[in-house]
Amino acid sequence: MDRIAEFRKWKVQCLSKADLSRKGSVDEDVVELVQFLNMRDEFFTTSSCAGRILLLDGGINGFEVQKQNCCWLLVTHKPCVKDDVIVALKKANGDATLKFEPFVLHVQCRQLQDAQILAVRSTHGLEVPLSHKGKLMVTEEYIDFLLNVANQKMEENKKRIERFYNCLQHVLERETMTNLHPKIKEKNNSSYTHKKQRNQEKAHGQCITKENDKELENDDDDDLGINITIFPEDY
């Protein structure tokens, strides 16, 4: 069996399995994006989360929270209010931590070139301990402040999902047109080769600082499709 046929078979098997997530279904804000990817021959999704605010009660032997070994006191994919957090905190016996987790999407890709199109990074998160051994360590005013921050991140996260989806559609449409017109593909490959040569000449004979190195990487990323420029790291 060739690799393409093997990938297609694997995709059918994975998408036919039951959803084993806690919610048991795809989050509303990413349903359209997930369906779009699964309709493409070169992708299929294995898990996703549109972004959420969590209150976790972990162990009392350290502040590192392991979600598989802790109690979920509260979880929401919508903006959160202080009263809900205060009520949930009363159930904490260990170290309760408030977290905001941004949009996550795990995708299996048919080949490396397809994976490069989906290469995106983001540091848009939040994790703050609130109690220790069941004792609240912060004021309600501070909890209210944290929730304002978390809710703002949730709103920004939704915008990023929309931006990612729109850019992904644009890149894949451009990729399809390139594959249908070999002359365009040849021209793009030639342009990419010239750009690589310019970058090598630029780097040669210089002391490459971190800033220069980052600039070279960003130049290359333009030809890989969607990359870190969609979700800037300075959020």
Image (spheres, helix red, strand yellow):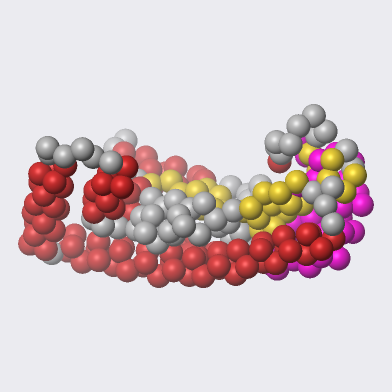
Tell me if 147 is positioned left or right of 233 in this view. right
Q: On screen, 3 above or below 176?
A: above
Residue at figure coordinates x 41%, y 52% from the top left: 120
- Residue 1 placement: quadrant: top left
Residue at figure coordinates x 13%, y 46% from the top left: 202
Residue 44's spot in the image, x, y percent? 45, 52
Residue at figure coordinates x 29%, y 37% from the top left: 2
Query: Is 90 a magenta residue?
Result: yes
In the rendered structure, which segment of residues is drawn in magenta?
Answer: 68-97
Q: Nearer the viewer, residue 31 or 196?
A: 196
Looking at the image, the residue that sits furthest to the front is 207
Residue 217's spot in the image, x, y percent? 28, 48
- Residue 177 placement: quadrant: bottom left
Residue 78's spot in the image, x, y percent? 69, 67
Tell me if 72 is positioned left or right of 185 in this view. right
Specify whether residue 113 is in view.
no
Tell me if 200 is positioned left or right of 170 in this view. left
Labels in figure, total = 0
Looking at the image, the residue that sits furthest to the top is 61
Q: Nearer the viewer, residue 193 or 152?
A: 152
Q: Nearer the viewer, residue 58 or 45?
A: 58
Residue 129's spot in the image, x, y percent? 75, 46
Query: Is 206 a magenta residue?
Result: no
Q: Nearer the viewer, residue 16 or 187?
A: 187
Tell me if 189 is positioned left or right of 109 in this view. left
